[in-house]
Image (cartoon, rainbow, N blue to C red):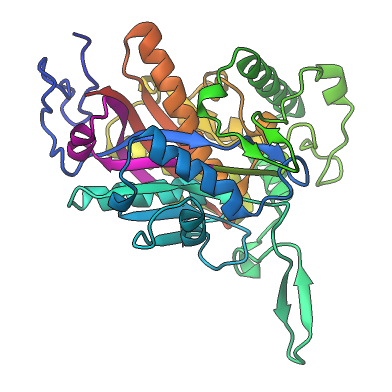
Amino acid sequence: MTPGPKSLASGKPLRNEDGAARGIDESRQPVIIAALRSPICRANGQLKFLRAPDLLAPVLASLVETAGVDPSGVDDVIVGNAVGGGGNVARFASLRAGLPITVPGLTVDRQCGSGLDAIALASRLVAAGGDPLFLAGGVESISRAPARANRNDDGELDFYSRANFVPQQFGDPDMGVAAENVAHEFGVTRQRQDEYALRSHHRAVEAARTGVFADEIVPLKGNEKLVDSDDGPKASLRAPLMARFPAAFVAGGSVTAANSCFDADAASAVVMTSLKRARAMGATDGMLVLGCHTAGVDPELLGIGAAHAAQRLLDQHAVAAGEIDLVEFNEAFASQTIACLEYLGIDPRRANLDGGALALGHGYGASGAVLVTRIMAQARRSYSLRGESPLALAMISSAGGMGTAALLQYARF
């Protein structure tokens, strides 16, 4: 029998040869037993007619069916969302998905980290005990995001394009400016950013060509058309074309439209429960959630937040960067992706093996959950090919100077 994943505290196999858990309380061990996502499509593109609940509801319904979940047994639906209009998108989407009215919903906002933080929250609730079951993830319809405004003293509306994330004395830079700050602070050159972004596109194109994404995507109906694939990766992109793009955010800078992500509409979610309940449901594999951490950093260098969260998480579990098998980082900008990975001692070429947000797009509140969905698909593929139980790290930086990371490991049980 293939050895099970190791307990990070003891270094001993998590499973005995008979499959019984060793050294953990199965009723408090969070595990993800299913993960799916929508296609990721450019904002104002193929999915522009779908509001956030309409993007998410088919994913939730497919998860319930795929995992064999009794809809009435779902304890809560926890969803991240960044630019929606409020109204608790989690509750709206769960009812749209056909879940019973007895199932509540909770929407969380940590901007770009919202989807990963929703999953982290669900894992902590499982760890608190009681063998609950959650649907957790994130969604963003940037195409249908409501117009936002503050009300002036005279009652007139003052519309704005983005919220203030921190008080002005902390800087509160726009995302592209912050990416330039990170590039300068950590010495990430334009050439390296372009090379990384180009590699992301080529990897995503190859993954799509070979059907790697097929099983994780829930097709959605756009405007009278079924959308079943991502529309971002560019097979024709080449280095000479990348080099022609001008600086996009700071004059004379190195961050361009070509080495930055594009806005996207997307949804992604997982089924989270305890290892004990997963076994009782008949699940045979999943991603154990070993830990999660969120950290705050200087808002002027907000892109480095994921690295600080990940470093604290790895330190807590006495895990060296070299022990991580799979790394998924939200590629909002090539500059911050490279800076974060190298801060942790991870070769950037080891991350995002099937491409990332630079090629696929960034659906804000959905992106953190997309990372976990991608990891689960990669881990299952790794196990089927090599019989290994990969150790994985998901990371995302957020506006306002924050980052969230999750440490996971694939297990058969």
Say whether residue 247 is left or right of residue 303.
right
Across and down, in percent, residue 40 comes to 64, 36
Residue in the picture at 40% in, 21% down? 379
Across and down, in percent, residue 120 comes to 37, 47
Using the rendered image of the protein, determine whether residue 37 is visible from the camera's viewpoint: yes
Determine if the magenta segment contains residue 53. Answer: no
Residue in the picture at 73% in, 90% down? 153
- Which residue is situated farthest in the bottom direction here? 154
Using the rendered image of the protein, determine whether residue 365 is visible from the camera's viewpoint: no
Determine if the magenta segment contains residue 292. Answer: yes
In which image quadrant can residue 182 be found? top right
In this orientation, which residue lies closer to the viewer: 261 or 317? Answer: 261
In which image quadrant can residue 160 be found? bottom right
Main SS, magenta residues:
strand
Across and down, in percent, residue 253 comes to 81, 40
Quadrant containing the N terminus is: top left
What segment carries the magenta color? Answer: 268-293
